[in-house]
Image (cartoon, coloured by chain):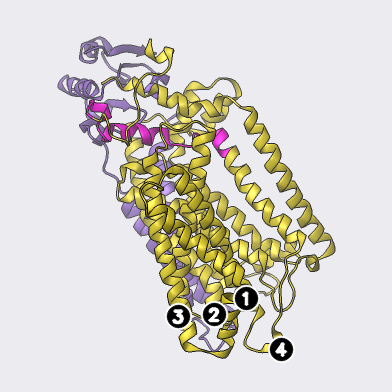
Amino acid sequence: MSAIYGLYADPNIAQRAVNNLRALGVADADITVISSEPFEHFEFGHRDAKTAMPWIAAGAGLAGLGLTYWLLGASQRSWPLVTAGMPVVPLWTNLIIIFEMTMLSAILATVITLVVTAFVGQRGKLYDPEVSDGYILVGVEHPPDAAKLEPALTIDGGRVKHAS
Amino acid sequence: MNRTLTKPFTDDMVRPVMSTTVWFWAILLATGTVVACGAAAWAYQLWYGIGVSGKRWPGFWALYLTNFVFWIGISHAGTLISAILRLVNAGWRRPVTRVAEVITVFALMIGAMFPIIHLGRPWLAFWLFPYPSAREIWPNFRSPLAWDFFAINTYLTGSLLFLLLPMIPDFATIRDRATGWRKSVYRTLAFGWRGTTTQWNRLESAMQIMAIAILPVAVSVHTIVSFDFSMANVPMWHSTIFGPYFVAGAIFSGIAALIIAMAALRKALHLEKYLQPLHFENLGKLLLLMSILWAYFVFNERLTVWYGNEHHEMAVFWATQRGQYAPFYWTMVVCNFLVPMLLLTNPYTRTITGCVIASFGVVVGMWLERFLIVVPSLAHKALPYSWGTYTPTPVELYIMAATFAAMILLYTLFAKFVPIIAIWEMKAGDFAHGAGQGVGAGDPHRIDTTPVSTEAAS
């Protein structure tokens, strides 16, 4: 993997580096920003923020609700135990299990979505261990012309590095 | 503002993972011994049968079920408080959340063991699991015990994931600093975390969704545990107030456990800079609020029973007010209401020490409350010929002591392998509260970014 990147101690400078890369025509999707904390107060921290995760969680919750409703009813009808004069399929008591399974489905779908969208395929990609000391990495992987990008990253004490 | 000044903070958090003190081994040995004694007591019970416990007709739900309800209650400290504070974006939550979430997971694990210990033949526990089986034992979904199974497992799964997900960025931080076998272990645990903006955004979204989902689950768990009692036609159990009463009591005992855990960690891991008096004061106020709420519920429950004047309920009522269980009852009132009122209403005594003393009182008081719910009612059922008494045996007491030791043991091990304060959340909080912009001086939430080591200073 070839890459060029800068390490910045200050998020304001990191934001400027991102802006400089954009000014040079680098597409947003090609700019990598890596940090040891989320930067909600900076524009670069909101790139790629849109996610269908809440909808997926809601959908999975609904699916869990429907499936549990059906499974409970089916198993109760298969072995019709009459308890304390309650109906064979008592909705009041079934609601408790339906609720738990709805929430569990939503939680599991959220975690699966997170794993698929944020963790899969990360190995071997651009990274520098200095990030964990608080530095913010701004860079471009597989740059067509690294020399052209270097001035955009060489700003205010930022250290530019090359990875090959 | 140079963000690398957060390095001393990261070093403080990672240090316990990288180095081991004599105290760690001492705690491990002491708690391990007690846990081993508890395991031996359980083995003794398995060998000689359930009769070696004090469970006798009519008190078949005795100390084991008391501890089950107690530990499930303690579990309400973490995920519930953490989720609420996360959703309202309370800045002071940052050093507290992980300390709290760990309590939930371990307390649930310990609590969920008690129904198994309670069984005469626990190797057949899977017979109770609600699934259609070849033995033609079909699940009875009307049973509160089946509801327990679903509720506790949902809460445990959710809480475990709620705890694990925010640990991944911290595993990556340790991965970058560790060498040798530690590096391999933490590289695996970090799941290839790099800290890209996409990863942060997805993690934050997932945590928000899970916080929303886990709140009603947490409330449902203790409501369902209360259903184990209130669905039965037993004096002073069959009450509509039990659901919210149990939830309030659970949050109450949970906060107390959290304060004790925070104080212990603060001292043991030298976290004075991060777990500040402000955090204890805020939790102390919350504990006071829950104490008042608890008293309100107890008053409601007692008044209704007394006013109803049902013969069989009054037997339980008087047994706890002025009979054989009265010492436990009044100790409970002192611990759960008077001590918190005395110590936490006064700003001069609402110190770390004051909060810890009140919390110890609440933990004792809430355990007694669980005991007083379980035992006197079973000992005074509707028909007087079935009245009886209950005395715990050493087997039960050993097992109970072992669970408390197990909690300390598990917590110590966790704090050894994982930063007990979320590093990335603290850093993010530092910036959110202005320290990163150089305007946060004096803000009690912020990380103290003063270089403390010569390495950082240079």
Q: Nearer the viewer, residue A6 or B114?
A: B114
Q: Residues within 10 Å of mark 2 (few under 14, many from 20)?
A: many
Which residue is under mark 2?
B236
Q: Quadrant of residue B9?
A: top left
**Image location of residue B438, percent across then percent down:** 23, 25
Q: The residue under label 3 is which amino acid type?
A: Leu
How far apart marks 1 and 4 lie (CA) works out to: 15 Å
How far apart marks 3 and 4 lie (CA) works out to: 27 Å
Single out the residue that lies furthest toward the left. Answer: A23
Q: Which residues are magenta?
A: B414-439
Query: Drawn colour of chain A?
Result: purple
How far apart marks 3 and 1 lie (CA) works out to: 18 Å
Q: Does dot 3 land on a helix, a strand or a loop?
A: helix
Q: Residues within 10 Å of mark 1 (few under 14, many from 20)?
A: many
Q: The residue under label 4 is which amino acid type?
A: Tyr
Chain for numbered disc 4: B
Which residue is under mark 3?
B303
Which residue is under mark 4?
B385
Q: Does dot 2 land on a helix, a strand or a loop?
A: loop
Let me know if residue B434 is in the magenta part. yes
How far apart marks 2 and 3 lie (CA) works out to: 12 Å
The reply to whether the C-beta atoms of the residues labelled 2 and 1 are less than 8 Å apart is yes
